[in-house]
Image (cartoon, rainbow, N blue to C red):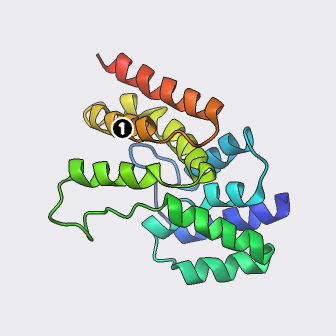
Amino acid sequence: MEEILLKVRDFADKAHGTQMRKYTPERYIVHPVRVMETVRSYSNKLPMLAAALLHDVLEDTPVSQEEMLRFLKEVMTLEDAEETLRLVIEMTDVFIKEDYPKLNRKHRKQKEAERIAETSPDAQTIKYADILDNCSKIAVLSPGFAPKYLRECLAILNVTDKGDQLLYAKALNAVKNSLGNLK
């Protein structure tokens, strides 16, 4: 499994290219790797771990679903490849500015939270890990944006209760603590 995850990590890293993390000097790949490591503390399912590594690829890079599936089928079973892609699709924002220019950020994020509420328990578990990693330093690195972002995370957590409950509690606690530290 480690060899497969290394190949998936390399694919994600290549897809993200020179992209950097917002508010930090880190290469983007460090974020999906941390998300995957968090998920790994709660599940050892290959599709979940691979999807954690790939969770922003469709959203933030030119890689298509077809390209991703073609790659995944080269490194894992067809069943795992299809499950990984399904999870990545579930993790990919649908209500983006480019596709919904008439909706403001608040409404897009509200619709996105409603959409995420309908995703699978595995996708929600990955989302908790994503939120946990994203909110860990935002209050320090972007104090102006942090309140809005953390409230958006809280709105998602308020409607997603199907994932791993221990990770959910950890993410909820982290968001609430970060919000509390801003005051």
Q: Is residue 116 above or below residue 65?
A: above
77 vs 71, nearest the viewer: 77
Number of residues whose C-alpha sits closer than 10 Å to that of mark 1, classed few (under 14), some (14–19) or many (20 or more): some
Q: For this view, does 76 lie left or right of residue 90?
A: right
In x, y percent, where is residue 51?
A: 63, 60
Q: Residue at x 68, y 62 (%)?
A: 9
Q: For this view, does 76 lie left or right of residue 86?
A: right
Q: Residue at x 70, y 66 (%)?
A: 8
Q: How many marks?
A: 1
Report helix, strand or loop for mark 1. helix
65 vs 15, nearest the viewer: 65
Q: Is residue 68 above or below residue 163?
A: below
Q: For this view, does 141 lie left or right of residue 102?
A: right
In x, y percent, where is residue 46?
A: 77, 58
Residue furthest to the left: 102
Q: Quadrant of residue 170?
A: top right
Amino acid type, mark 1: Ala
Q: Give the residue number, with chain letter if any, for mark 1.
A: 155
Q: Residue at x 56, y 64 (%)?
A: 88
Can I make out residue 8 in this image?
A: yes
Q: Quadrant of residue 76?
A: bottom right
26 vs 59, nearest the viewer: 59
Can I make out residue 56 in this image?
A: no
Quarter holding the N terminus? bottom right
